[in-house]
Image (cartoon, coloured by chain):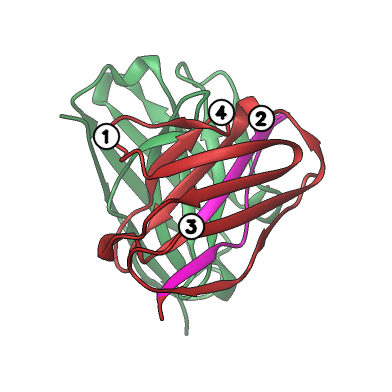
Amino acid sequence: EVQLVESGGGLVQPGGSLRLSCAASGFTFSSYWMSWVRQAPGKGLEWVANIKHDGSEKYHVDSVKGRFTISRDNAKNSLYLQMNSLRAEDTAVYYCARWSSSGWYYWGQGTLVTVSS
Amino acid sequence: EIVLTQSPGTLSLSPGERATLSCRASQSISSSYLAWYQQRPGQAPRFLIYGASSRATGIPDRFSGSGSGTDFTLTISRLEPEDFAVYYCQHYSSSQWTFGQGTKVEIK
């Protein structure tokens, strides 16, 4: 059974940093692109970042470029999102998801990040 | 940048009725990379349709997708109680992944 379990969310002050993790199991992690998708409270879904199966390609939405970095450790079956210079508008539930050319079939349950003083 | 616009914002229907949801792209897109998701309150999104018209594994056949070019449609033939949720279309192209703003299907 495919499982994606996010962790690392919490309350952080504006300008602060946070590192999200996603533990993957039930599939060959190193064979798949992985993603972070977020959802602000009461709002829609927003793609944040994607990373190729071997980490050689990374893409980020313009609003987080230069502040967030997606990475992975295939030996640990883990996906990460390093978030720096956090802003109030980054407050959201962050989902880890497995990307295929068809779409995001598998999703984690999400971890809440709150940016507030 | 491709923008996906969904309409209507909210659809008020009764169980058993047919729901028709629209997703319009700001320019012509490949239907191969057009997907639909369902999100129930407090849950992660659920993958429904890929390639504009193919149902994901385990998705009931009352869900169908169609369209090409700039206009795409998700149809739910007969609404079941569990179908009342928010639906998002999504597109991938040139290393950009985009969602529509969502359509809420609510009980009338």
Mark 2 and mark 3 on one chain: yes
Label 1 is placed on what type of residue? Gly
- In this rendering, does residue A66 appear at all? no
Secondary structure under the numbered disc 3 in the rendered image: strand
Crowd rating for badge 3 (residues with CA inside 10 Å; few <14, some 14–19, many 20+): many
**Image quarter in which the C terminus of chain B is found:** bottom left
Residue A3 position (above or below residue B7): above
Q: Which mark is residue B76?
A: none
According to the picture, the residue beneath numbered tag 2 turns out to be: B31
Q: CA distance from mark 2 to mark 4?
A: 6 Å
- Residue B69 percent location from the top left of the image: 78, 35
- Residue extent of the magenta highlight: B88-106
Magenta: main secondary structure equals strand
Q: Colour of chain B?
A: red
Identify the residue under disc 3.
Answer: B87
Task: Specify whether disc 3 shares its chain with disc 1.
Answer: yes
Q: Which residue is mark 1?
A: B58
Q: Earlier in the sequence, mark 2 or mark 4?
A: 2
Q: Is residue B95 highlighted in magenta?
A: yes
Q: Position of residue A34 (x, y in %)?
A: 44, 31
Q: Amino acid at mark 2?
A: Ser
Q: Are marks 2 and 1 in contact (CB under 8 Å)?
A: no
Q: Nearer the viewer, residue A61 or B36?
A: B36
Estimate the spatial distance between the alpha carbons at disc 1 and disc 4, rounded to whole Å.
16 Å
Q: Earlier in the sequence, mark 3 or mark 1?
A: 1
Q: Residue visible at 41% across and 53% down?
A: B38
